[in-house]
Image (spheres, helix red, strand yellow):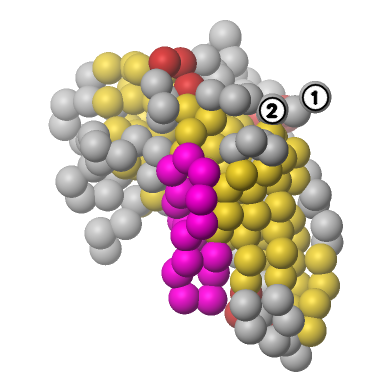
Amino acid sequence: NAGVMQNPRHLVRRRGQEARLRCSPMKGHSHVYWYRQLPEEGLKFMVYLQKENIIDESGMPKERFSAEFPKEGPSILRIQQVVRGDSAAYFCASSSGLTQETQYFGPGTRLLVL
Amino acid sequence: QKEVEQDPGPLSVPEGAIVSLNCTYSNSAFQYFMWYRQYSRKGPELLMYTYSSGNKEDGRFTAQVDKSSKYISLFIRDSQPSDSATYLCAMSGAGGTSYGKLTFGQGTILTVHP
């Protein structure tokens, strides 16, 4: 499967727990983006990363959220001390270094906070 | 005012109809314009990508961009029930803080009935 992979596909957490979402980009892609889709809302940009670098985190909430894309392994979106308002679908996208605007999305992780 | 406005619909058409989907935007820095299709509980799938103004055709799909009016369109000819999905317009700038960051419309829900 050469597409963007995300896991887990579904994640249930209780308030106060941590959520870790993983994303493996398409083969040959070195740029990763995270978006959040809240119920009845459109996709909202969160963060743009390259290997070992955060390029743009202007869409990330100031607290509890962090993202990384290490030299080896998948990109991780981490949400600490989750609250009910964090319940959403989180999508990862990837692109090549030449065409950042053509982004290919993964199937998403649906986070439910109880 | 949102940067990208898209009528959420829902839009219901008979099989074989021509479908017109539209978005308007306010940020004159946008240079790249995309259309995504999203089936229920799936990730967005890139359909069309256009740079600056003009038309682009791919099979039954035609994308139009009018930068002077800040207006983009997606036309679907000979619509099929399998086209039933949510259609999202997305845009990004050519550089600076908006490069690589897609701004989405809310999405239009389309149903094509046999």
CB under 8 Å between discs 1 and 2: yes
Say if labels 1 and 2 share a chain. Answer: yes
Please state which amino acid type lies under the numbered disc 1.
Gln
Mark found first going from the N terminus, 1 or 2: 1
Q: Which mark is residue B109?
A: none
Q: Residue furthest bottom?
A: B114
Q: Nearer the viewer, residue B101 or B42?
A: B101
Disc 1 versus disc 2: distance between alpha carbons? Answer: 9 Å
Mark 1 nearby-residue class (10 Å; few <14, some 14–19, many ≥20): few
For disc 1, the marked residue is B1
On the image, the x and y values in percent for residue A108 come to 50, 48
- Going by the picture, which residue comes out furthest to the top? A62
Q: Mark yes or no: residue B22 visible.
A: yes
- Name the amino acid type tagged 2: Ser
What residue appears at the point 34 percent right and 17 percent down from the top-left corner? A54
B106 horizontally vs A51: left or right: right
Up the image or down, B83 lies above or below A23; here it is: below
* Numbered disc in front, either 1 or 2: 2
Q: As drawn, is A89 to the left or to the right of A39?
A: left
Image: magenta residue range: B46-62
Query: Which of A93 and B76 lies nearest the eye of the viewer?
Result: B76
Disc 2 target residue: B26
Q: Chain of mark 1?
A: B
Which residue is at a point 16% across and 26% down the rendered structure image?
A71
Q: Is residue B60 magenta?
A: yes
Secondary structure, mark 1, is loop
Residue A62 pos. (x, y %): 57, 9
Q: Residue A40 or A68: which is nearer the viewer?
A: A40
Where in the figure is residue A14, as x and y percent of width and height? 64, 32
